[in-house]
Every structure is written in C-alpha cells, then in structure tokens.
Amino acid sequence: MLSNLELVEDFASALVKFDAGGAVFKDYRPGVGPHSEDAMVKAAMSILRDSKPESWGRARTKRTPDLLIEGDWQIEVKLLRPYGDNNRIAENWSQNLLHPYAGNESCLGDCLKLLRSERQERRGILVVGYEHNPCKTPLEPCLRGFEILAKSILGVELSKREEVVCTGLIHPVHQVARVSFWEVVK
C-alpha cells in the first residue's frame, strides 16, 4: 500500500519524466504544464505502471474518482494554474480548489464527494500546481485556504499535506510544479 508521501513522490517523479520528453498538448508549447487534467493523469499513470507495477499496476483513470488504485486509494485530482500557456493570468484559476459547495468540481466539492463514496479505498486529493521561477503568483495562499475551508467551513478532516516541488520543467511559464496531496480522513 502506498503511503501519502510515496504517492506524491511517485506522481511528481512521473510528471518530471513526462515533461522531459517534451510532449505537446494541442497547440500549446512543449511540457507537462499545459496538459489537461485528464491527459496529465493518463501520462503519469502510463509511466508509473511501467516503472512501479507493484504499486501502480492496479491504477486506472476514471470519471469518479479521477484515479483509482484498487484496494488502496481513490483520488480526485485538480490542476492549479494561475497563468496560461500565453503567460497571461487565468481568470478564476483558484476556483478549482476553493468553491465550497457540494456538487461542484472544486477540491472542496471533491472532498464531499469522496466522503459520500461507498468504496473502501482510502480517499485523497492530489493537486498539481504550476508556478514561474522565480514565482510571480504563489500557490501557498490558495493551498492553505483549501485546508482552512475544508476544516473550518465543511468540517472535513485532512491529513498533513505532503508536497514535492519539481523545478526545471521545460515550459517557459509552467516552470515549477508543486504536487500536493492530502488524505481525506473524515
């Protein structure tokens, strides 16, 4: 069974490997940063199934949850990109984390969805955020806001955040990835 730290370290490592390959998504510049959530998760899973089949061989991407490791984890994944491929600030970028209503697509809504799940696997939230180097718009206030809102407003208990920061990504805007993970305890 994957620990919280192993999970985030493995996922971050797969993203770095995928990024180094120079993959292009649609008409955007090369690198993992512009990829959609679904494309990013599928690429990471392809790498992890090959490199760590004992831990990730049972992993599959789904609609609900975004990522399922049978018998181990059910995980909802979110992207956090303050800037687009064109280096312009993205409107409403923080809503992916912070919209506090059931039934929406935010991390807070995903926490509630995971808690309603009848599956027996542990529940987790994985956020992949991108920053410039040096940072123009820090992600930390948004990540911390998610933690505070989950606990104080929704009454959701999260584990301590595990995080891996990946530098040296090839995209000129999405240069640093912050891969953060929380177990949704109750």
Image (cartoon, rainbow, N blue to C red):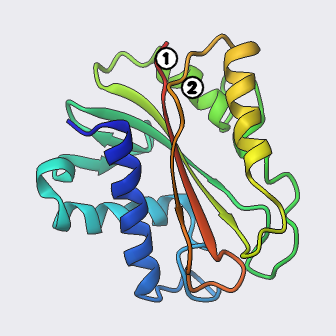
Q: Mark 2 points at which residue?
A: 111
Q: Can residue 95 be seen in this view?
A: no
Kind of element beneath mark 1: helix
Q: Name the residue under label 1.
A: 115
Q: Nearer the viewer, residue 20 or 113?
A: 20
Location of residue 30 by image quarter = bottom right
In the picture shown, does residue 87 fall above or below 38? below
**Residue 114 picture location, percent across and down:** 48, 24
Q: Do the residues labelled 1 and 2 touch (CB within 8 Å)?
A: yes
Amino acid type shown at disc 1: Leu
In the picture shown, does residue 12 fall above or below 56? below
The CA distance from mark 1 to mark 2 is 6 Å
In the picture shown, does residue 81 fall above or below 24? above
Amino acid type shown at disc 2: Cys
- Circle 1 residues within 10 Å: few <14, some 14–19, many ≥20: some
**Residue 11 picture location, percent across and down:** 38, 57
169 to the left or right of 89: left
Give the residue at x 24% y 32%.
Answer: 72
Location of residue 21 by image quarter = bottom left
Q: Nearer the viewer, residue 57 or 13?
A: 13
Location of residue 96 by image quarter = top right
Q: Residue 164 carries which label?
A: none
Q: Nearer the viewer, residue 99 or 17?
A: 17
**Residue 3 picture location, percent across and down:** 30, 37
Q: Can residue 160 be seen in this view?
A: yes
Give the residue at x 54% y 23%.
Answer: 158
100 to the left or right of 20: right
Give the residue at x 43% y 68%.
Answer: 15
